[in-house]
Amino acid sequence: MGNPVTGIGAAVVRREDARFITGAGRYTDDIRVEGQAYAVFVRSPYAHARIVEIDCAQASEIPGVVAILTGDDMQADGIGSLPCGWNVTQKDGTDMRVPPHPPLATGHVNYVGDPVAVVVAESLETARQAAEAVAVEFDELPPVVDLATAQVSAEIHAGITHNLAYEWELGDREATDAALAGAAHVTRLDLVNNRLIPNAMEPRAALGIHDAATGEHTLYTTSQNPHLARLILSAFVNVAPEHKLRIIAPDVGGGFGSKIFVYGEETTVIWAARRLRRPVKWTADRSESFLADAHGRDHLTHAELGLDAEGRFVALKVHTVANLGAYLSTFASAVPTYLYGTLLAGQYRTPCIHVEVHGVYTNTAPVDAYRGAGRPEATYVVERIVENAARETGRDPAELRRLNMIRPEDFPYQTPVALVYDTGNYEQSLDRALELADYRGFSERRRQSAANGRRRGIGFACYIEACGLAPSRLAISLGAGVGLYESGEVRFNPTGSVTVFTGTHSHGQGHETTFAQVVSHRLGVPFEAVEVVHGDTGRIEFGLGTYGSRSLAVGGSALVLAADKVIEKGRLIAAHLMESSPDNVDFEDGAYRLKDSNRSMTIQEVAFASYVPGNYPDGLEPGLSEKAFYDPENFTYPAGTHIAEVEVDEQTGVVSLVNFIAVDDFGRIVNPLVVHGQVHGGVAQGVGQALLEVGRYDATGQLLTGTMMDYCLPRADDLPDFVVDTTVTPCTHNPLGVKGCGEAGAIGSPAAVMNAVTDALGVPDLAMPATPEKVWRELRRQREQA
Amino acid sequence: MYRFRHHRPATVDEAARIFSDCEDPAYLGGGMTLIPTMKQRLAAPTDLIDLGRVDGLSGIRVSGEEIRIGAFTRHADVAASREVIHAIPALASLARQIGDMQVRNRGTIGGSVANSDPAADYPAAVVALGATVHTNRRRIAGDDFFKDLFETALEPGEIITAIDFPIPARAAYRKFPQPASRYAIVGVMVAELGGKARVGVTGAGPCAFRATALEEALNRGFDAAHLEGVEIPDAGFNTDMHASAEYRAHLVGVMAGQALAAL
Amino acid sequence: MQITLSVNGRSHTLDVPENTLLVDIIRERLRLTGTHVGCDTSQCGACTVHMDGRAVKSCTVLAGQADGASITTIEGIGTVDALHPMQAAFRECHALQCGFCTPGMIMTAIDLVENTSQLDGSTVREGLKGNLCRCTGYHNIVKAVLSAADKA
């Protein structure tokens, strides 16, 4: 049963909001400790250069400067290189090629913003002043900026020829080529997936504290996964032993992937705190975030889709060059490979698929996971080329999709690119979306727009994603350096309240509410009696964090397992107290009941008894607290249909998004309020990619879009209200039947919007973002041709 | 931000006197441009002379044929002014389109005009309406005020005290905002004043200017039809990643047409 | 320089360097950390507070400009037990996720509702363009502001 007001499925208003709306949130920069000093990084102004000399003499003399430290100092202290956590095996069987990534650059700098030294001072103002006074002599080297030519440009990292991290492939090349050769029609498309800069509203920050007496290191930082950060900093970077390193991610102001990674700055802060024997704090300026947060996307792709005479897809072939930036960030290698190539089947029964990916180094900021991570890129390829195939063969784009969709009876469905989809009903989402979009009325709306000097277009994206990352054995067999299970603990306190510990981290997702709904539902205790703790390696046993829409599907499942263990132990106690046997005790709605009498007691009474075990089963440990690890047996596969409708102003080229419909199947839903919010935000980011956002470097590697004055984040007046609905096919392999909802909005929307824009313009492609001048030039070209 | 001295004179004369005594001074209006620039360490005046406490610099007064707006009048006050909305609705509308609400609550007309940012909105109105810029030393015709990128006819130490806007028979302002910063990529004010057309353009060039080709066309007939086919030469126009000179030139025509339609 | 300002109804006289920003006074001197800094170019609006009753970006106000002013921050408009209607509307409508932009968004929204005669979806969106949110896509923020405006 469960409580209809607070249980699973209820639109519970978030409890964490109380602190956020009153200004009582506690973000890393809000924390101040006695004696803290302030760090400012000296960064490379060049995209590629040799460090000749770092002269700190003048800067060191500025009163208030505590220390100026460089990469050499770090190396001397035994601090290692920042690792990439996923080894990609190349198509020739060799390992990917990884350059060293010192937290502070040594020898060379490889992108504008690469940190070369840190100034620690008594005040932020002094630290800034001294950072300007650090004189770094650089010997400039030719930068490699253009992704298209990077493989034939100068070598960035010694010994990494062609600037290639890896050449990777998946699928059957021969069968795909043969099927394409025999296809009745082949649609070809070249695509650019534009570089994005994440811009979580809270900039990254770190506060490092070292207690010399205990040897304990504490790092408050903006992390989506504090345990993973601890593991990496301890095992690979050698900052401190794992048991002497506590990482606390307090309130974190958004992540979208950018706070998954272990960066040089946070590493430097905790090391410097120990070395200098005083707390050190660093908070990024937004300008630093632009330069030095890992960016997202940045692919060049050629794709070919073959169709038979009836319109059935016979083969898809994809070749992608993926920009990895200057170094291999924490998960960078996996994003354009295992999180991309494996998704190219989309929702369709395409029998043959082959993908080859070249991961390429350039003298730009590292590129890693950003909301969706690989899956938006895959969806963009599939859904753009399917749309074009429909246009080229004169078919309705919705019907061509329907014809090729995996049907409910096909599940479990083995794709030609490794994944096995467990369940879904794609046509159901498509039909609901068509209805909400009033697809039938589109031609009339198009006519009305034309009468007002506007071209109207409609675009679809029937996306799939693999999330709930991830089955550990599979992930490790594919190169992951860690398992991707999740841990949780459900602890009854003696008075009957429940403290829940999760290894996932909430930085906007609302776990404090939704996980409490799950646990209170399962245990049958009041929602108000359940508290969720996250984000502190000192309080929570272990965890892999929040990314890849995994928290509920994996972390929530761990909590269900832990709660079930609690219930089972409680059954033993209840049976004893009610003088019966455990198999004669039922548990429902928070109460243990004897099957053969009306005797019952609440789980909270049982909890009290467990902590005051006077009358207690022999041999049973006191207390009622259980831990569980949940390792998923498969990915989860959210899917759905997004439909965008746009109007293009003939005079200015301005594209207005006039309608956006998202119908998603996330499996069972714990809290629709939160789920819809996740969709809204994801869609806004995807619309941003399609219409507004692009991270752009000039030919010398200077970031042109380095502030919010030039990098165009969506504002309130750029977006319409969204129409959001859901369909439900429960996930078949986790106890909650949930799939995950965090990324879907950003996965489906770019393709939907660009399909609408290209439909309005009547062109096969237009590179994202569809900015007014770009659109105006296309309109002018068409007028001149006419 | 580097260190500086913050002066808060009570009169224009005192402000000017402090200015002449300082090494590298700057006047501070609302600070909506200057403060961010200083925060980015792109400007480092030794002395800021804050005009916020100078008596008599703010206020809006309508007299017969013109509106006088004190230099320290904030954008939000111009936008909300009943007098301005009644006499020159286009000016109130322009003020309402500047930046965002918080910026309008701080930014001042004098600061905006004195800065001659090529993408600021007010300069379009100054030239289109043939405004008169009053300073502590003289009066400067709007047509002669903007000289170049961030350059005006103001001499060192000279302070704008008020701007007089003649009340046009009709006027309208249309803006094509830069999508990220919301400054004008192009802003055009079209006005009919003393029986003649005047067209002020901001955003397109290094500073605000009158689009004489458009004015001549409109003087032949004050409607959109007469704008058709008028070439806007893009020589000297700004080019950046958001808009090329060519696109800006095109937008000047489009915004002018939209302004006309709104008259 | 010495300045005196009232923050959330309490008067403070402070000695600060001239290059101190209002947001630094609020966060670092008065330790009211609900007001956030999200950018360094006066674009994001996370630092929005009320200065003499109007929404301003406190990252773009100098100490000397704030001298004598009456400042209201997010901490000054309501408490958990007695929320301002705008705070309540944000919670009811799920108009926040990570919460970082929220205080600035609420302060802007209050000014908007108080100083705009008729609000609809498009005027609210226009009024909020000085505040960036990366989480919500603004959908529920607009809903919250309209809901609070309805009740005002």
Image: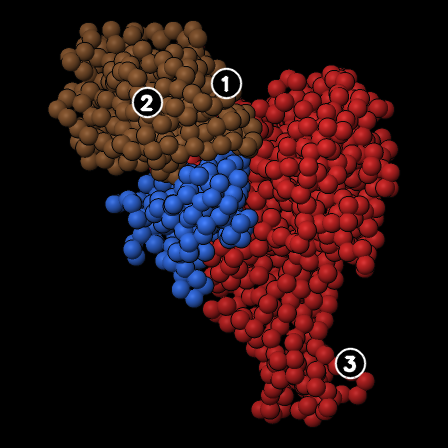
Chain colours: A red, B brown, C blue
Which residue is at 79% across, 24% downward?
A53
In the picture, the disc for residue B160 is: 2
Between residues A63 and A675, which one lies in front from this camera angle? A63
In the picture, the disc for residue A11 is: none
**Is C62 placed left or right of A568 in the picture?**
left
Q: Quadrant of the N terminus of chain B?
A: top right
Circle 3 sits on which residue? Answer: A621
- The kind of residue tagged 3 is Glu
Between residues A694 and C132, which one lies in front from this camera angle? C132
Q: Chain of mark 3?
A: A
Between residues C60 and B258, which one lies in front from this camera angle? C60
Labels 1 and 2 in the same subunit = yes
Give SS at disc 2.
strand
Give SS at disc 1.
loop
Circle 1 sits on which residue? Answer: B240
Which residue is at 53% across, 71% downward?
A528
- The kind of residue tagged 1 is Asp
Give SS at disc 3.
loop
- Observer-side mark, 3 or 2, equals 2
Q: Looking at the image, do the residues carrying marks 1 and 2 touch, with CB atoms under 8 Å apart?
A: no
Real-space Cα separation, disc 1 to disc 3, in angstroms: 71 Å
- Mark 3 Cα shell of 10 Å, populated few (<14), some (14-19), many (≥20): few
- Observer-side mark, 1 or 2, equals 2
- Observer-side mark, 1 or 3, equals 1
Q: Is residue A19 visible?
A: yes
**Is C51 placed left or right of A702 in the picture?**
left
Q: Looking at the image, do the residues carrying marks 1 and 3 touch, with CB atoms under 8 Å apart?
A: no
**Is A679 placed left or right of C113 in the picture?**
right
